[in-house]
Image: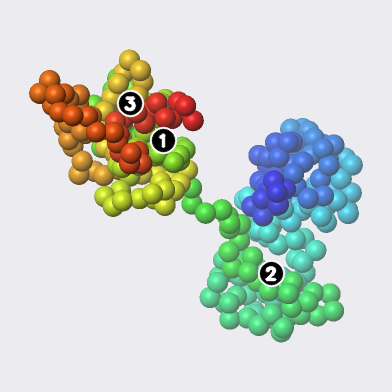
């Protein structure tokens, strides 16, 4: 799986480490180390075919690995794309038939999308290969990875003591349990959003609302610096006063009332109860 990901994204030949290069198709550990040693001794690679000068890296290995190795700002613009060197003649053929220079074709999606792959297919390169080459020329060096979004932690909030009830922060969900979700807000201690504070509607499973890795907005409801416990809410209209009132101890007058056993499922409960359940689980 790691090799598939590395080959799908491609590797910058001039900055890749030996361990990363070993993940490239066609390269052994010895070849990867030789590439790094060659680069250290002779300077950056200006074109892919210089790889043929690397000890123990022969034509067959070059054919297998070159398409996954990128040379940025090199002498040949095709070297920064996923086009394999053995298909360079095909690119030149396409350029000649369209009357465009190779440089003019790269990244020119308007022209490339108007071309019919069958018009350039032959006994050496089939229509499928031509289609792949046209796609790569249209978006050379594209990164197939989706955008990675991270939480933006608030400036000046670095530890639990910096938190104050009522603060609105951005955080990342680190874990989801049956009673709520834990959120990292940048203070080296995850806060708990109880299941009752995940949404304004009733939910039976926190996973219906959030999952690990989600970036969410939360409000600080309770802070226990001594025990490093942080109570959070994703209902931003909640107020800390309301949360504290819900979990406040009963008064002397209320304690005289007959006690009733609560048989309902623990959807709510105090933050201390939630943390206790988290510790037991």
User: What is the x, y in percent for residue 98?
Assistant: 65, 80
Between 255 and 188, the one lying in front of the other is 255
Q: Tell which tag, 2 or 1, sits nearer the viewer.
A: 1
Q: Is residue 169 visible?
A: no
Q: Which residue is at a point 58% across and 64% down the rendered structure image?
A: 139
Instruction: Give residue 182's mark.
Output: 1
Q: Which residue is at a point 64% across and 52% down the rendered structure image?
A: 9
Q: Which residue is at a point 71% across and 40% down the rendered structure image?
A: 20
Q: Tell which tag, 2 or 3, sits nearer the viewer.
A: 3
* Crowd band around label 3 with a 10 angstrom C-alpha radius: few (<14), some (14–19), many (20+): few
Left or right of 65 on screen, residue 71: left
Q: Quadrant of residue 225?
A: top left
Whole-Å distance between the Cαs marked 2 and 3? 58 Å
Return the residue at label 2: 132
User: What is the x, y in percent for residue 138?
Assistant: 59, 68
Looking at the rendered structure, the secondary structure element under dot 2 is helix
Above or below residue 134? Residue 199 is above
Instruction: Give residue 59's mark.
Output: none
Point out the tag, 2 or 1, that comes first from the N-terminus: 2
Looking at the rendered structure, the secondary structure element under dot 3 is helix
Return the residue at label 3: 272
Point out the tag, 2 or 3, that comes first from the N-terminus: 2
Instruction: In the displayed orientation, state which residue is furthest to the front.
Output: 258
Q: Which residue is at a point 74% across and 78% down the rendered structure image?
A: 127
Q: Is residue 144 visible?
A: yes
* Crowd band around label 2 with a 10 angstrom C-alpha radius: few (<14), some (14–19), many (20+): some
* Crowd band around label 1 with a 10 angstrom C-alpha radius: few (<14), some (14–19), many (20+): many
State the colouring used for the structure image.
rainbow
Looking at the rendered structure, the secondary structure element under dot 1 is strand
């Amino acid at each position: 799986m790691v090799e598939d990901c590395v080959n799908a994204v491609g590797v910058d030949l001039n900055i890749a480490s030996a361990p990363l290069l070993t993940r490239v198709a066609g390269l052994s550990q010895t070849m990867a180390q030789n590439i790094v040693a060659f680069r250290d001794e002779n300077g950056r690679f200006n074109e892919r075919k210089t790889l043929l000068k690397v000890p123990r890296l022969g034509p067959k290995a070059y054919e297998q690995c070159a398409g996954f190795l990128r040379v940025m700002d090199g002498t040949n613009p095709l070297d920064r794309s996923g086009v394999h060197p053995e298909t360079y003649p095909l690119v030149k053929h396409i350029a000649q038939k369209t009357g465009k220079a190779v440089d003019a074709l790269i990244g020119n999606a308007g022209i490339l999308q108007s071309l019919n792959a069958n018009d350039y297919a032959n006994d050496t390169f089939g229509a499928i290969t031509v289609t792949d080459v046209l796609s790569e020329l249209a978006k050379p060096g594209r990164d197939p990875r989706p955008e990675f979004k991270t939480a933006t932690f608030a400036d000046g909030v670095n530890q639990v003591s910096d938190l104050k009830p009522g603060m609105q922060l951005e955080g990342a969900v680190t874990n989801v349990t049956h009673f709520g979700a834990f959120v990292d807000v940048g203070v080296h201690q995850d806060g708990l959003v109880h299941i009752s504070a995940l949404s304004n509607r009733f939910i039976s499973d926190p996973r219906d609302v959030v999952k690990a890795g989600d970036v969410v907005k939360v409000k600080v409801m309770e802070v226990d610096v001594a025990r490093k416990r942080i109570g959070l809410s994703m209902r931003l209209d909640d107020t800390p006063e309301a949360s504290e009132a819900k979990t406040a101890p009963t008064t002397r007058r209320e304690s005289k009332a007959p006690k009733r056993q609560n048989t309902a499922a623990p959807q709510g409960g105090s933050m201390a109860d939630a943390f206790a359940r988290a510790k037991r689980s």
